[in-house]
Image (cartoon, grey):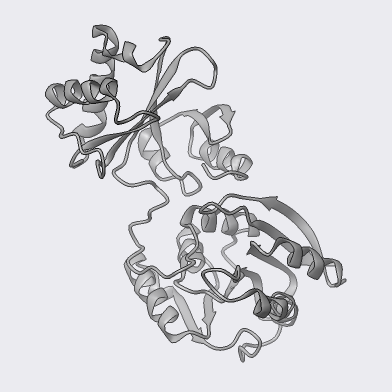
């Protein structure tokens, strides 16, 4: 689970029929149907958790604990074509973990591939302080690595964060949805997959970005429902007042754009959204230009902040804000 998204990840899991328990800094402990849990869009990954009341990982080599761990690996690997397993743990290359890997390899027939094993076992101290826990990831790739992403671009948005952004902006079947500076189309795809909409439009000035977005929309099976438009964000040519939900992953000034350009882009997006937004429009923005965003919001009176949350994204901690007209 990405930092900052716990309340909405909890809500989504409950809607999927899961029983949600303790909340941790990096996740939620849940019980529920596996198929439902694997359909979660705000979860970065889903793991089977095994708790062991042991003082150190060496004790996992004991007969009872090893049999339990082996059974879990077999159960997870049974229905999915994993090519190998690996440990994600401090000291994963130590003699203890090498021996544990040998035991699991011999018992399950699954190769130990320390660099690229798809079945990931995270071994760490139990946050409860009661020993150690092993988390066995249920899928070869994280849930955030969407199967529809066939085209990537520098600065592309994490799909889990995009799904959260869509959820917080609100989803309704009558929404006319606009994604400014849509890039490779992550927000547009996630909105299309979230449910029906009256219209779905993505705008970007970069022809290569739009080709990338088109490929991802096709892979997701939603291209027929979406319109892509090549235009500068300041001069879209779109009809004023024509959109109920507007979203933008604003340039952060590192992989995309520059800090100097952002001085103009950030306030321009508020102006454009004000012009294109229908009465009651919801505007969701994501940016790592934290001070600039604060300054821009303070200097205007047209938008009020409905929600403001700091989230995690690839080593950064951008802000996600949802605005409504004041």
- Image check: 126 left or right of 80? right
Q: In which quarter of the image is the C terminus?
A: bottom right
Task: Name above or below for residue 238 compared with residue 3.
Answer: below
Of residue 259 and residue 130, the one placed in the foreground of this image is 259
Can residue 121 be seen at all in this image of the molecule?
Answer: yes
Q: Residue at x 56, y 68 (%)?
A: 254
Q: Position of residue 96 (x, y in %)?
A: 28, 20
Of residue 287 and residue 11, the one placed in the foreground of this image is 287
- Image check: 256 left or right of 288? left
Q: Position of residue 15 (x, y in %)?
A: 53, 40
Q: Position of residue 230 (x, y in %)?
A: 50, 87
Q: Residue at x 30, y 26 (%)?
A: 94
- Image check: 292 left or right of 37? right
**Count of labels in the image:** 0
Can residue 175 be seen at all in this image of the molecule?
Answer: no
Task: Name above or below for residue 276 compared with residue 70.
Answer: below
Q: Residue at x 19, y 24 (%)?
A: 104
Quarter of the image where one finds residue 292 = bottom right
Q: Residue at x 12, y 29 (%)?
A: 109
Q: Position of residue 317 (x, y in %)?
A: 62, 52
């Amino acid at each position: 689970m990405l930092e900052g998204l716990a309340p909405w990840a909890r809500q989504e899991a409950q809607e999927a029929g899961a029983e949600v328990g303790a909340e941790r800094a990096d996740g939620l402990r849940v019980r529920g149907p596996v198929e439902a849990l694997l359909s979660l869009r705000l979860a970065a990954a889903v793991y089977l958790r095994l708790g062991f009341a042991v003082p150190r990982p060496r004790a996992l080599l004991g007969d009872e604990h090893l049999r339990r761990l082996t059974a879990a690996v077999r159960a997870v690997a049974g229905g999915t074509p994993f090519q190998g397993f690996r440990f994600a743990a401090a000291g994963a290359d130590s003699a203890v973990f090498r021996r544990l890997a040998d035991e699991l390899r011999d018992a399950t027939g699954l190769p130990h591939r320390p660099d690229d094993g798809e079945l990931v076992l995270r071994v760490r101290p139990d946050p409860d302080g009661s020993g150690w826990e092993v988390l066995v990831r249920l899928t070869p790739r994280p849930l955030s690595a969407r199967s529809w992403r066939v085209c990537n671009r520098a600065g592309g948005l994490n799909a889990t964060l995009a799904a959260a952004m869509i959820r917080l902006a609100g989803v309704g079947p009558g929404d006319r949805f606009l994604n400014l500076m849509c890039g490779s189309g992550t927000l547009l795809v996630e909105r299309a997959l979230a449910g029906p909409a009256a219209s779905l439009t993505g705008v970007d000035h970069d022809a290569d970005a739009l080709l990338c977005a088109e490929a991802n929309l096709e892979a997701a099976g939603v291209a027929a429902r979406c319109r892509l438009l090549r235009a500068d964000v300041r001069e879209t040519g779109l009809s004023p007042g024509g959109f109920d939900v507007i979203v933008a992953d604003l340039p952060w000034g590192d992989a995309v754009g520059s800090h100097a350009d952002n001085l103009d882009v950030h306030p321009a997006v508020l102006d454009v959204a004000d012009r294109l937004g229908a009465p009651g429009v919801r505007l969701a923005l994501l940016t790592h230009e934290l001070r600039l965003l604060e300054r821009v919001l303070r200097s205007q009176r047209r938008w009020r902040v409905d929600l403001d949350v700091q989230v995690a994204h690839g080593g950064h901690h951008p802000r996600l804000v949802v605005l409504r007209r004041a």
